[in-house]
Amino acid sequence: MTDGPHRLAVIGAGPAGLAASLAAAARGIHVTLIDSATSAGGQFYRRPASGLGARRPRALHHRWRTWRRLEQGLAGHLEAGTVEFLADHHVWLVERTGASTGTRPGFTVHALVGPLQERPVGVRADAVVLATGGYEKVLPFPGWTLPGVVTAGGAQAMLKGGLVVPGRRVVVAGSGPLLLPVATGLAGAGAEVAALVESLDPRRLPRAAGALAAEPGKVAEAVLYAARLLRHRVPFLPRHTVVEAHGAARLEAVTVAALGPDGRVRPGTGRRIPCDTLAVGHGMLPHTDLAGALGCRIDGARVDVDDEQRTDVPGVWAAGETTGIGGAVLSLAEGHLAGRSVAARLRGTGPDPRPAAKAVRVQARARTFSAALDAVYTPPAHWTDQVTDDTVVCRCEEVTAGRVREAAGLGAGDVRTVKLFTRAGMGWCQGRICEPAVAGLVGCEQTPARRLLARPVPLGVLARAGSDDDDRPPGASSPPEPGHTSPPLDRQ
């Protein structure tokens, strides 16, 4: 592609999306950066609204200098017109266009605009970078639907974005590196963290010694978090897990218990901890909906890419958590590589590997580090033993664990068949939340479902597809700008 202006759509304005946008724009590509939030930064660089008057927003973050460089770089490209940022745009489909009409092949990114997500907008592009991030893995237990039980990332988002703590007395529980910044952040904001409950057995950490030694900065970061926990006198309970949440109208206490070497709860070790909030998390999963709808190859739970972050669909790149959970440092490196690759491919120039050598080295170390952590930070091996038959697994359709087990007994050996038997996964979230739990209860592998639409779309939007009223970008009162179009009536 060497003729005409080159346009790139980057979906997701977190670390990977920002790095890809800046790298591509610096090499002469016009970038449209699209995100569902009202400002750039993603979950990692989520910041409070200016109206809240936060005096030291950097106190809720680490790597603040990196964010400032990204922010300044984005501001410069926005002023120069090389990057257009579409905030509060909720992407529901990326469509390949042009191939069947004889025009230059490309893509149309379809989004719903605004908090009500009612008005459709389309963005045309020659190439797409998927930087859609990840979402939390949620595992059920008795009482997990009580008000006051939130995800660990949800608690962190409330603190970063709203400067509020979810409760006065909080238990942080689950497994994974995210628990440390959540617990220290809540304690530093004035909440009483009654306990940090981690299912990991610390004796497993030496297995990752080589990867840890290669990332001394990460080790220092963990030590800093541990020092803060000690300063706030937060009790640390390793090899423990939450077995039940208690309360009538809302959460009042949790019961935690010790885990044996086999990952089973040790009888007689349960202890009840009074609290009004439980922040629980068991790691994250990549967002792959848009990639799956495009036909990109999904390897396990992540989008498969080559050394340039290219997927197997021509014109589609992917970077960051969608290609495997690995943190902000890895996302920045992958985003930079993707942006460089897009620019080289669209402009028809050969990529120069020398300036990207640092990003490649950072990427390799970060991938090795994240793989090592994945091997040691795992949910308890027998977590399903604590899930009673009356525990709700699919909250959208109110499907209990007993019904899932009954479906398995009738021969349902995969998530899709369980859905057909029980409706688990047919609700608003389309199984994104309950799929790990259903797979665990059935004893099958969790494989991401390929969904045509990445989010719920009002029928009115589909009914109006192709009308003249939808052919305008946000705020326009005249025909659409060159980069915008409306959703089609049929698929190419």
Image (spheres, rainbow, N blue to C red):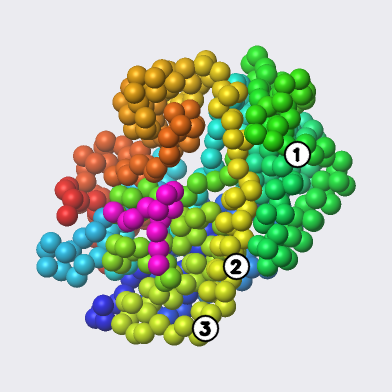
Residue 232 occupies quadrant: top right
Q: Residue furthest left?
A: 101
Where is 293 relative to 25, above or below? above
Mark 1 sits on what residue? Answer: 238
Q: Position of residue 283 (x, y in %)?
A: 58, 44
Q: Secondary structure at mark 2?
A: helix
Q: Which of pointers 1 and 3 indicates the residue nearer the eye?
A: 1
Q: Tell me the magenta residue range.
A: 295-306
Quarter of the figure with residue 252? top right
Residue type, numbered disc 3: Pro
Task: Give x and y (percent) for residue 176.
Answer: 64, 46
Kindly identify the amino acid type of the residue bearing the numbered disc 1: Pro
Q: Tell me, for residue 355, which label it has, or none.
A: 3
Q: Nearer the viewer, residue 257 or 292?
A: 257
Q: In the rendered image, is residue 195 in sight?
A: yes
Query: Which residue is labeled 2 in the image?
Result: 365
Label 2 near label 3: C-beta < 8 Å? no
Quarter residue 282 falls in: top right
Residue drawn at (72%, 42%) of the image:
201
3D distance between C-alphas at marks 1 and 2 = 27 Å
Res. 478 in view: no
Sequence-first tag of 1 and 3: 1
Circle 1: is it few (<14), some (14-19), or many (20+) Cα within 10 Å?
Answer: some
**Label 1 SS:** strand
Q: Which of labels 3 and 2 is toward the front?
A: 2
> On the rendered structure, is 18 left or right of 264?
left
Marking on residue 393 = none
Residue 158 highlighted magenta (yes or no) = no
Whether 7 is drawn above or below 419: the answer is below
